């Protein structure tokens, strides 16, 4: 029987294992994760979890019974440290705990880790990152502590803003420091960035753009051998922002250690083709750890790394098909979401390379859409608190259709009624 080893007990890893069993694979499947927890959802960590609204079972992907019923051996709290391969792709993996796992097929779903901020003072007590469950478990009671009142969030991306919103909702004094000239600038247009800046400031959040951080400030440890606690963040201009807690959210770094060890091509992530195959033609990889050809039919060319649940699940389907010897290629309309208190952003498509923006509705009313066009073709949209319009755009993009810019700007016309299918677009 064919044995499959999946390194990375995350959503992509679970998806691959599940599909293999659904497709009739009867050989051993090993799913190995270095965290001590069963595979879980990451998005709730920066929202409901740190707010104290969720329990562990609320974020767990699958029950123990689910794995047992499918005869998937889930190994948690252990890390694969070495992999030896034969020419046919089979091999043996060794874990940090001394376990030896023989396999015929290998999948890497190793994910990504929080990017560390390289400044003085990040080792003070009260400085946090938020990428995994253990970090969330530590952060949640710290946020709830009544003695923690001044919170500084370094990074104005989605994780930073989601966490900052939770802290503000708990009544904390929150300051967000963003090095770029606008919030979430890597993902959305100026119109959406400006909305977030205004909306969060209206809710009492302090936001500093173009922030240049010098170092973190802390007090001496009260007990010998322990770390001192953070007390502030110093900017290069001499400003000191008081801080009882600092949360750093400045992006992630793909986990590529095993790929390097295996001699696979790595370029900003594990390089894979449209079939999720790595450079050796045998290993497959999926999720946040990969750099792949842009799967979006309306996207620009080149290679891309997508950090989203949707991408992890969809790319994992292709990886599973490749393990089964099928010739499948990843083509999909990417979509994302971010919940920041009562502000829900849904994104459909990829806006890279846009040359026109249509703002539909009034941002001040906190229910509007930003539609992106390239050469007159709709390619993406940011939708704030308007799920009906998100579904209309996502459906249109999936069909390769467009919504003329003039119709999109007219709020009296429902977006779903303005969709123009490809074969009906005037020449």
Image: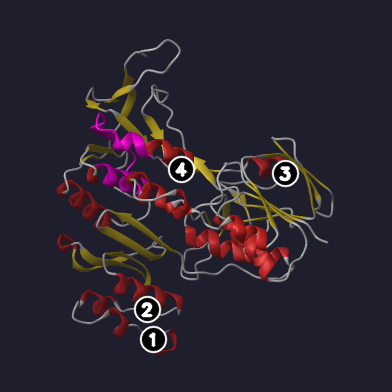
Magenta span of residues: 140-167
Q: Which mark is residue 402?
A: 2
Classify mark 1: helix, strand or loop: loop
Answer with mark 3 or mark 1, whichever residue precedes in sequence.
Answer: 3
Do the residues under discs 1 and 4 have CB atoms within 8 angstroms?
A: no
* Foreground label between 4 and 3: 4
Do the residues under discs 2 and 1 have CB atoms within 8 angstroms?
A: yes
Q: Which residue is mark 4?
A: 131
Quadrant where the C terminus sits is: bottom left
Do the residues under discs 3 and 2 have CB atoms within 8 angstroms?
A: no
Measured from the top left, where is residue 124 in percent x and y?
A: 39, 23
Answer with mark 1 or mark 4, whichever residue precedes in sequence.
Answer: 4
* Neighbourhood count class around disc 4 (C-alpha, 10 Å): few under 14, some 14–19, many 20 upward: many
Q: Which residue is mark 1?
A: 425
Q: Which residue is mark 3?
A: 263
At x 70%, y 60%, the residue is 71
At x 51%, y 52%, the residue is 40
């Amino acid at each position: 029987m064919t044995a499959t080893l999946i390194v990375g007990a995350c959503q992509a890893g679970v998806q691959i294992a599940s599909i293999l069993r659904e497709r009739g694979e009867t050989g051993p499947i090993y799913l190995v994760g270095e965290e001590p927890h069963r595979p879980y959802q990451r998005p709730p960590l920066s929202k409901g979890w740190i707010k104290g609204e969720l329990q562990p079972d609320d974020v767990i992907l699958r029950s123990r019974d689910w794995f047992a019923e499918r005869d998937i051996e889930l190994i948690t709290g252990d890390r694969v440290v070495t992999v030896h391969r034969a020419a046919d792709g089979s091999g043996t993996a060794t874990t940090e705990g001394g376990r030896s796992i023989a396999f015929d097929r290998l999948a890497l779903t190793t994910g990504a880790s929080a990017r560390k901020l390289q400044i003085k003072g990040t080792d003070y007590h009260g400085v946090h990152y938020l990428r995994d469950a253990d970090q969330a478990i530590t952060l949640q009671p710290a946020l709830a502590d009544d003695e923690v009142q001044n919170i500084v969030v370094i990074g104005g991306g989605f994780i930073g803003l989601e966490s900052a919103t939770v802290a503000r909702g708990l009544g904390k004094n929150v300051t967000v420091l963003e090095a770029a000239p606008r919030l979430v600038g890597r993902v959305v247009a100026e119109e959406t960035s400006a909305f977030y800046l205004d909306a969060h400031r209206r809710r009492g959040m302090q936001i500093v753009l173009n922030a240049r951080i010098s170092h973190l400030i802390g007090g001496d440890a009260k007990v010998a051998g322990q770390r001192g606690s953070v007390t502030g963040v110093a900017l290069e201009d001499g400003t000191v922002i008081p801080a009882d807690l600092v949360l750093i959210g400045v992006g992630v770094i793909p986990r590529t250690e095993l790929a390097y060890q295996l001699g696979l091509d790595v370029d900003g992530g594990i390089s894979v083709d449209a079939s999720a195959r790595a450079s050796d033609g045998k290993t497959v990889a999926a999720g946040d750890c990969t750099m792949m050809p842009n799967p979006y039919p309306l996207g620009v060319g080149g290679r891309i790394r997508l950090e989203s649940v949707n991408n992890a699940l969809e790319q994992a389907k292709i990886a599973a098909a490749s393990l089964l010897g099928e010739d499948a290629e990843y083509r999909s309309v990417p979509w994302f979401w971010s919940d920041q208190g009562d502000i829900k952003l849904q994104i459909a498509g990829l806006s890279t390379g846009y040359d026109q923006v249509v703002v539909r509705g009034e941002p001040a009313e906190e229910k509007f859409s930003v539609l992106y066009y390239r050469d007159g073709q709709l390619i993406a949209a940011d939708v704030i608190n308007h799920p009906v319009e998100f579904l209309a755009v996502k459906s249109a993009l999936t069909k390769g259709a467009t919504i003329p810019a003039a119709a999109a700007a007219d709020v009296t016309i429902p977006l779903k009624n303005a969709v123009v299918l490809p074969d009906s677009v005037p020449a």
